[in-house]
Amino acid sequence: MPDTLTLTDNRTGLTYEVAIEDGAVRANALRQIKVDEADFGLMSYDPAFLNTASVRSAVTFIDGDVGILRYRGYPIEQLATESTYLETAFLLLFGELPTKDELARFEHEITFHTFVHENVKTLMTGFRYDAHPMGMFVSVVAALGTLYPEAAKVDDPDVRLAQVIRLIAKVPTIAAWSYRHNKGLPFVYPDNDLGFAENFLSMMFKMAEPKYEPDPALVRALEVLFILHADHEQNCSANAMRAIGSSKVDPYSALAGAAAALYGPLHGGANEAVLRMLAQIGDVKNVPEFVERVKSGEGRLMGFGHRVYKNYDPRAKIIKETADSVFEVTGRNPLLDIALELEKIALEDEYFVSRKLYPNVDFYSGLIYQALGLPTAMFPVLFAIPRTAGWLAQWLEGIVDPEQKIARPRQIYIGADERSYVPIEQRSAGVRDLVAAS
Ligand code: CMC
């Protein structure tokens, strides 16, 4: 049997054969289907890209039906147990696990690029005292690009690599300083003796002590969370990174756009909503009543369900185990009992079972962040730090892909046909009146 699809256009009676490649047909193959020579040709219409592959990618694999997530072929469970965030970032960026020497060099390069230009301090102090840390993060990442004008040479591999190192190294500094600004605390400079996650905690929490020494269990928990959040194939922000990057703008501007996409409550903000929900439930005894309200259509069970995973999100399993190691140090988060009871009831309930609704990555992560002393407004920023590696891996892949061009979707125009300009005194109703009447 040939790997082709035969299509009959019932408007003309003509038949077309279209190649099937990797389980997909090229949307452009439809353009040959026309009613006459003047016809533009058939398009595919796919709002929200529900069934459109926009890239061929070798970075991350997800099988949502069985709950599989792999970076460059390595199962997320193995990376979360065996790897570090920087080793995982190297894997995502360059396709293979590093040798000992490669890893040492990469770690050194990242560590020695964590400082930011002093102008960044001035910029950050210009924000209002209560500016959202994610708003500061997005703006400062974009501003960082102005300090490295050579970053515009995106076709030069050495220039690309230098910006990749700078971005991965500097995002924790920007993130921590956004928190310090909110608190009215002095900015803490990076400490090159510390590892990636340790240094971030030091920049967040160091006060008068000469050296900040976080508990190793908490450092490891943060490393695991960073590994789990490092990439998730073509999600909203990765798609933004690739689309903006396709214009060949510098990676700071593209990454600021990706971070802005992550800021949205449907993407990086759900873990905050989980905490609000658990606090609102207030007590384990209120869980059954809350579940009934969700089932009757009164709101959603936040941290449950996923567009891709129709099984337990593999990241949620690992986060649940990580939570235990954190609570051993910090004491148990009282909201955990409510979360466990919610999960238990939901996993047995026909409503959730039949809709394949399982806990996602956000169900337990907020509880850990809260136990680490991190305020809810910082949650999307904590997501953005490790996702920087994923965004850059996606960007690097896109920029050298010979099939990629500037991202420019088609549209189905539904507006007015050509009409003549109406002088102002002859117009009957104002636009706002028309909108109000519709
Ligand atoms: N609680 C209750 N019912 C739900 C939920 C939920 N969390 N999620 C989906 N459903 C129901 C929904 O009402 C619908 O039922 P019916 O068929 O009777 O109308 C059915 O399940 C399918 O839902 P959908 O909205 O078509 O599914 P979707 O793939 O468009 O939505 C989702 C995916 C993640 C937006 C959604 O599950 C949701 O809103 N979950 C809660 C928010 C959340 O936890 N988001 C984090 C996502 S993971 C992190 C990230 O992507 O950044």
Image: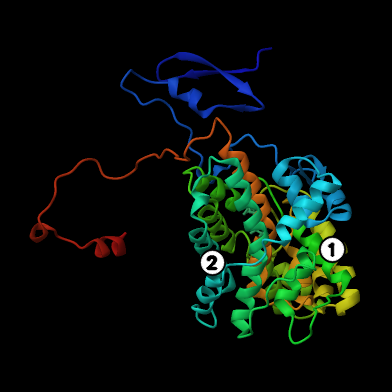
Relative horizontal placement of residue 9, taking residue 364 as reference (left or right): left
| Helix, strand or loop under label 1 | helix
Of the pair 36 and 97, the residue shown nearer to us: 97
Residue that label 2 marks: 140
Check mark 1 vs ligand 1: CB closer than 8 Å? yes or no. Answer: no
102 lies above or below 136? above
Q: Is the Cβ of the residue at disc 2 closer than 8 Å to that at disc 1?
A: no
Relative image position of residue 280 (x, y in whole percent) = 69, 78
Residue 61 picture location, percent across and down: 73, 41
Asked if one can make out residue 16 in the rendered structure from this viewpoint, the answer is yes
Quarter containing the C terminus: bottom left
> Which of 67 and 400 lies nearest the eye of the viewer?
400
Q: Is residue 36 above or below residue 304?
A: above
* Residue labelled with disc 1: 320
Which residue is painted at 82% across and 77% down in the image?
284
For the N terminus, give its image quadrant: top right
Residue 231: which disc? none
Q: Residue at x 76, y 57 (%)?
A: 108
